[in-house]
Amino acid sequence: MRVGMLIAVALTLLLGTVPSSATTPAAHTYLAKLDRAPAGSQAALVRQAGRFEGYVCSPDPTVTRTFARWYRGAVDGFGGFRAVLPEGIDFSGNVDGARFAGTVRNRAGTTFAFIGARVSAGPAGLYRGMVTYRGHAVTVGAIVGSDGTFCAAAHSGARLAAETERSPERLARDRIAVRIGPERTRAVLSLVTRLATSP
């Protein structure tokens, strides 16, 4: 009887570990440069289990203030994705296999198209971190392109809190540090390799 109980416990533990790893697909990262935008303007998207998280940023202050946001939503069965923010910014397109294409457009009609590809995450990819800036918690987003192109911005909710310096400090393959605002507050960002479990 003791042996039987041990076998049952072992099977429970073994089988209990299988579904989470077997049913949770890996996340894939896609990067693209914005067409006809200032040099270094980029879009990133991480896709996992029918959902996505996207980000847009640029070394150009005007593009950053207008489009540097986090975009989240669902990916349909054909690879289509779309997120429309309350301020009217529309981030949409298609991600399928190794290809990533779409547009980002604001309410005034300013539009940037992008065509990119899937990358092996790290060091290229989408980065995110939290830091206290001027007494408030802010989220810092950054994109490191396959060619090393870099852009980042700091956000307090939907509002742009501060711009960042243009040269990150590489801490590890999946971590960077950036300085934000005139105070040069240091923020450590980690590579986004999976999406949160909630939509």
Image (cartoon, rainbow, N blue to C red):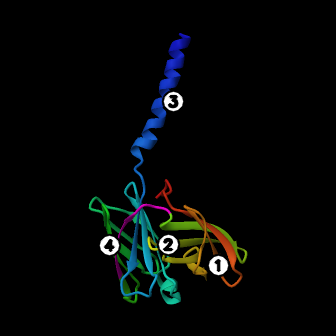
Measure the alpha-carbon separation of dots 2 and 3: 39 Å
Residue 118 falls within the magenta-colored stretch? yes
Near mark 3 (Cα within 10 A), the count class, few <14, some 14-19 or many ≥20, is few
Marks 3 and 4, the one that precedes in the sequence: 3
Marks 4 and 2, the one that precedes in the sequence: 4
Residue 75 image position (x, y, % from top left)? 35, 62
Measure the alpha-carbon separation of dots 3 and 4: 43 Å
Would you identify the image quadrant in which residue 48 lies?
A: bottom left
Is residue 50 shown above or below 13? Answer: below
**Residue at coordinates 65% horizontally, 70% vertically from top-left?**
187
Q: Which residue is mark 1?
A: 180
Of circles 4 and 2, the one toward us is 2
Q: With 193 as the anchor, is 114 left or right in this view?
A: left
Is residue 135 shown above or below 125? Answer: below
**Residue range (magenta):** 113-122
Magenta span main SS: strand
SS at mark 1 in the image? strand
Q: Which residue is mark 3?
A: 13
Of circles 1 and 3, the one toward us is 1
Marks 2 and 3, the one that precedes in the sequence: 3
Dot 2 amino acid type: Ile
Measure the alpha-carbon separation of dots 1 and 4: 30 Å
Asked if the residue under mark 2 is in contact with the one under mark 4, i.e. CB atoms within 8 Å, the reply is: no
Q: Which residue is mark 2?
A: 143
Marks 1 and 3, the one that precedes in the sequence: 3
SS at mark 2 in the image? strand
Residue 34 falls within the magenta-colored stretch? no
Dot 1 amino acid type: Ile
Q: Which residue is mark 4?
A: 101
